[in-house]
Image (tube, rainbow, N blue to C red):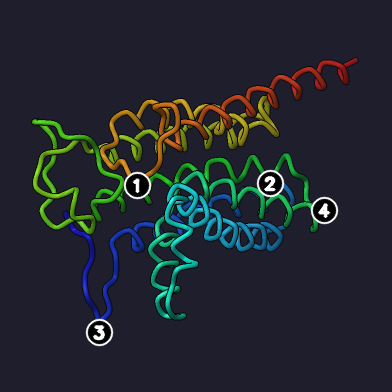
């Protein structure tokens, strides 16, 4: 595909370009509607900035946990340079769920500190997450990471950044997930802008639906370095937990709403 290009001697990855497109497309949309609901836009900008820090830390930390068997090698380093090289190898990759969880935690803390209306904040953030991740998955496809299993009718990578992805036709699972995220974005955006029926529940709705699609798509993934537990990948295990947590949240919220209705 097209993993990236060089400019002024520096390699610019396609993934980074698509991620930036996602950020500068999705975040302004969320900020626009938050301002429309509250008259304030700066507060949500701060939420997004702190969330970005949480995303960065979380996605690398979870990747490192999938490589936990190599962590003891950090203590076998013979120099600081050697330690840093091993650290980068173990924690240098990224896992979406780690970034999602880290971003949600950091964003929640920021919103609470600023005393923002959480229902509106989470509603505005839900479609932003879906749209941003959709663009990021297109970046994964261009770079050749998060690749699919071998399939005779698939797409053959020849210059993917991950060597094991090259040379055989593979399921374009990255594009499947991107399409799934774009559909989710459209649904969430319509619910945010056209109705008040699910006010305060859109993020939980996203966290209920996305794990289902992710759990299924994981069976089409061909990169086996992400960790497996009881025959399920790390992301599938997390999908189950997030789905269950979101379902419980929605049930409790519905019951509280009924109890507060005269």
| Left or right of residue 7, residue 87 in this image | right
Are discs 2 and 4 less than 8 Å apart at CB?
no
- Residue that appears at 40% across and 67% down: 86
Say which residue label 4 marks: 115
Foreground residue among 193 and 47: 47
Of mark 3 and mark 4, the one earlier in the sequence is 3
Q: Which residue is mark 3?
A: 8
Q: Identify which residue, 167 or 153, lies in the foreground.
A: 167
Q: Element under label 2?
A: helix
Q: Residue 262 occupies which quadrant of the picture? A: top right
Marks 3 and 2, how far apart at CA? 40 Å
Q: Earlier in the sequence, mark 3 or mark 1?
A: 3
- Measured Cα–Cα span from mark 3 to mark 4: 45 Å
Q: Which one is nearer the viewer's eye here, 259 or 64?
A: 64
Q: Could you give the CA–CA distance between mark 1 and mark 2, rounded to whole angstroms?
A: 24 Å
Q: Looking at the image, is mark 4 or mark 1 nearer the viewer?
A: 1
Whole-percent x, y for residue 205 in the image? 58, 29
- Most extreme residue toward the bottom is 8
Query: Sequence order check: which comes first, mark 4 or mark 1?
Result: 4
Mark 3 residue element: loop
The residue carrying mark 1 is 137
Res 45 → quadrant: bottom right
């Amino acid at each position: 595909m097209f993993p990236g290009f060089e400019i002024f001697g520096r390699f610019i990855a396609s993934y980074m370009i698509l991620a930036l497109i996602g950020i500068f497309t999705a975040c302004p949309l969320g900020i626009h509607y938050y301002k429309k609901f509250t008259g304030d836009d700066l507060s949500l900008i701060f939420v997004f900035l702190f969330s970005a820090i949480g995303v960065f830390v979380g996605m690398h930390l979870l990747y490192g946990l999938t490589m936990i068997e190599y962590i003891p090698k950090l203590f076998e380093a013979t120099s600081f340079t050697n330690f840093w090289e091993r650290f980068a190898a173990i924690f240098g990759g990224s896992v979406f769920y780690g970034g999602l969880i880290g971003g949600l935690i950091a964003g929640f803390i920021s919103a609470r500190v600023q005393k923002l209306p959480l229902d509106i904040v989470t509603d505005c953030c839900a479609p932003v997450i879906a749209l941003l991740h959709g663009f990021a998955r297109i970046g994964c496809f261009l770079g050749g990471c998060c690749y699919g299993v071998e399939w005779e009718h698939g797409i053959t990578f020849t210059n993917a950044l991950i060597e094991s992805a090259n040379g055989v036709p593979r399921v374009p699972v990255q594009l499947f997930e991107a399409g799934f995220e774009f559909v989710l974005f459209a649904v969430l955006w319509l619910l945010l802008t056209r109705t008040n029926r699910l006010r305060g529940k859109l993020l939980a709705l996203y966290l209920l639906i996305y794990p289902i699609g992710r759990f299924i798509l994981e069976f089409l993934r061909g990169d086996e370095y992400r960790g497996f537990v009881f025959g399920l990948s790390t992301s599938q295990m997390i999908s189950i937990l997030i789905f269950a947590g979101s379902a419980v949240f929605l049930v409790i919220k519905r019951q509280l709403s009924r109890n507060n209705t005269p």
